[in-house]
Image (spheres, rainbow, N blue to C red):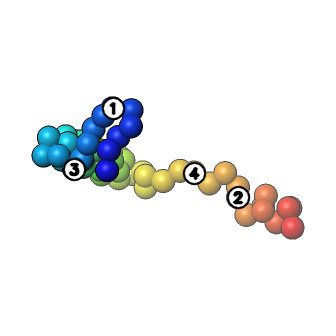
Amino acid sequence: MASLRNRLDTTTPGGKLVFHVFASVAEFEQDITREMTMASLEAARSRGRKGVRKPVMNRKMSQRRS
């Protein structure tokens, strides 16, 4: 596979290396985001929050629509 815009040919050793580096950075970023999210949810729980959004509709509002 070759990139048409960047001339990145993933069939060559150098192209494979760059491809793997990009994939590693993306995986690292995903792990950091997951770690920060879990820490935020844990902090919210320690403050007594559930870590979920408040519902937009309540039961009374949903019964009026029917």
Tag 3 residue: 11
In this rendered view, identify the residue nearer to me: 21 or 26: 21
Q: Mark on residue 60? A: none
Give percent across and percent down for residue 58: 70, 58
Q: Find numbered disc 3 in the image and state the secondary structure of the residue it sits on.
A: loop
Tag 2 residue: 58
Question: Neighbour class for label 2 at 10 Å: few (<14), some, many (≥20)?
Answer: few
Residue 43 seen in this snapshot: no
Question: Neighbour class for label 4 at 10 Å: few (<14), some, many (≥20)?
Answer: few
The amino acid beneath tag 3 is Thr
Spatial distance from mark 4 to mark 3, Cα to Cα? 50 Å
The amino acid beneath tag 1 is Asn
In this rendered view, identify the residue nearer to me: 20 or 24: 20
Q: Nearer the viewer, mark 1 or mark 4?
A: 1
Tag 4 residue: 54
Q: Find numbered disc 1 in the image and state the secondary structure of the residue it sits on.
A: loop
Q: Which callout, 4 or 3, points at the residue further toward the start of the chain?
A: 3
